[in-house]
Image (spheres, grey):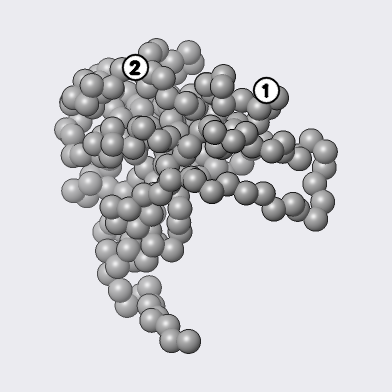
Amino acid sequence: MNYTTFDTDRIDHLQTYRLIVGSVVPRPIAWVSSISTEGVPNLAPFSFFTCVSHVPPLFSISAGERDKKMKDTAKNIQDTKGYVIHSVAEGWQQKMSDSSANFGPRENEFKALGIETVPSDLVDAPRIKDTPIAMECRFEDMIVYGDEWKTHLVIGRALRWHVREDLMLDNKYIDPAGLRPVGRLGGPNYCRTGDIYQIERPYAPPDEVHPNASKH
């Protein structure tokens, strides 16, 4: 079997990016609302996103620079500390994609895209109305990587979850079939979660055994 090989010290950052987004798939999408010190709301998606820890509940968002400047989301989070991560589900993907446009720091993406919001409970950043899952978060730390091209790795702690009631199983688990999450692939490609199945682990404590996901 033949392979094409790439040495990371011999390719540019764009080719590195292409390999990453084509290899690490599918990726969950953090649809992040934040607010500036001037009170301007911001909304942007990030697929370089994952959970870091469950005790405490920590999440990471990786934000590259735009025009070699810190992205509005990263700056807002660093300045005002509170933000909201929304899960992207079927029906929301076009609005999510539209929010990735190059809006200026004083532009309100919510108004520009016709996205309704509700106030958050614990942070100043607004929450998208009617999204299936939203997590109010507090800024914990930022690690900056790179020299010419910088990446800001934002670490935040979840303070409060908002989960649509019909998605809860036994008031414990989130139903993946009902959520219908959207994943990011390489380039302009996305995927739907359409085929959900289970693989039993060799051993799982009783509290970690999930019930069968409901079928919709």
**Is 194 in front, or is 21?**
194
Residue nearest the observer in this picture, 32 or 80: 32
Q: How many marks are shown on the rendered structure?
A: 2
| Residue 55 picture location, percent across and down | 66, 36
Residue type at the position of mark 1: Asn
Q: Residues within 10 Å of mark 2 (few under 14, many from 20)?
A: some
Q: CA distance from mark 1 to mark 2?
A: 25 Å
Regarding residue 138, the answer to whether it shows in the image is no
Q: Where on the picture, by quarter, is residue 32?
A: top left
Q: Which residue is mark 1?
A: 171
Q: Is residue 144 above or below residue 12?
A: above
What residue lies at 28% left-to-right and 32% top-to-bottom? 95
Looking at the rendered structure, the kind of residue marked 2 is Thr
Residues packed near mark 1 inside 10 Å, few (<14), some (14 to 19) or many (20 plus): few
Is the C terminus in the top left, top right, bottom left or bottom right quadrant?
top right
Q: Which residue is mark 2?
A: 117
